Image: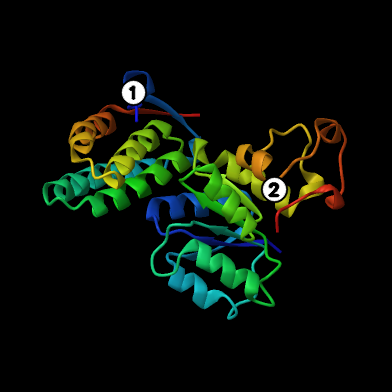
Amino acid sequence: MQRKELDTESAELVHVDTSFEPLVPKFLTNRKKEVVTMHDALAAKDLETVRKVAHGMKGAGGSYGFDHISEMAAVIEQAAKNGDPVTIERDLPALGSYLDRVKVVYE
Amino acid sequence: MKPKILVVEDEQDTAELLKHVLEREGFSVLQAKDGRQASSLIGTVRPPSLVLLDLVIPYVSGAELLKLIRDHPDWARTPVIVVSADSYQPDIQQTLSQGATAYVTKQKGSADLIQAMKRILHPSASSPKQPIVKKLAKAVRKRPPSARRRPRGSHGEKRAA
């Protein structure tokens, strides 16, 4: 399967519904914790945990309007399903970095 | 009285967001964090106005819950919107054939979900100019474009229930 290239730079600014503002900091903190969880699971060769966590992140990201988080999580989920730790090793740091850089505009 | 919505969702942040959005839209929310909690509600409480159902949940799957709802005499006619992170078309079709009223993917900040809920709970009040929910349009609502130009009563709504 051809790898879907993800344009992280253009997605760093995310426009979110103002009413979501009280929920977003916790949402982002929890996604960062999940990156650590997936990193630890990958080190333990536990791809099932990676798959489950990535699946949850895919849905949560989409629900909050962070579609890029959802897309990156979907790639990791699919790699875990495929038993492909190389892709996860490559994309997990990119996801962590994106979570550190993303800026939210409430509107 | 506010319409009551049962939200079956195991991901905590998503569940909180759905509760927040639904209460903002004037609904009363009952939550179940897994399939076991949800299945214990079926038959022990009065059916809600609508169920929002995640498919991938612990203990009892969303598909199994859907069957429990459709097989229960009091709950069988309750609309169920499946809310899923997955958008694989064959899975969507299968879910609809198993009795889901609609299937909405978790995208774009929940706007599609609210549209779908309003169409199901208040079909005659939904503006024909509102954008049709993407998955709903493909999988459930197949009204011809000409039919969207005038308001319609509830008899005009087609669902997969």
Would residue B115 appear left or right of A25 to someone viewing this image? right
Q: Which chain carries label 1?
A: A
Q: What residue type is labelled 1?
A: Glu
Question: Residue A1 at x, y = what percent?
Answer: 34, 31
Single out the residue that lies furthest toward the left: A43
Q: Say what secondary structure mark 2 lies in.
A: helix
Q: How far apart are marks 2 and 1 (CA)?
A: 36 Å
Which of the pair B31/A39 is nearer the observer? A39
Image quarter for residue B128?
top right
Single out the residue that lies furthest toward the top: A10
Question: Residue A20 at x, y = what percent?
Answer: 46, 41
Is residue B23 in view from this perspective? Answer: no
B1 over A70 or under it: above or below: below
Instruction: From the image, state whether disc 2 or disc 1 is nearer to you.
Output: 1
Residue on which disc 2 sits: B118
Q: How crowded is mark 1: few (under 14 residues within 10 Å), some or many (20 or more)?
A: few
Residue at screen point 17% across, 44% down? A39
Q: Say what secondary structure mark 1 lies in.
A: loop
Residue at screen point 19% across, 33% down? A93
Single out the residue that lies furthest toward the front: A1
A48 over A70 or under it: above or below: below
| Marks 2 and 1 close (CB-CB < 8 Å) | no
Q: Which amino acid does label 2 sit on?
A: Lys
Which of the pair B86/B19 is nearer the observer? B86
Would residue A41 appear left or right of B48 to someone viewing this image? left
Residue on which disc 1 sits: A5
Residue at screen point 36% across, 48% down? A55
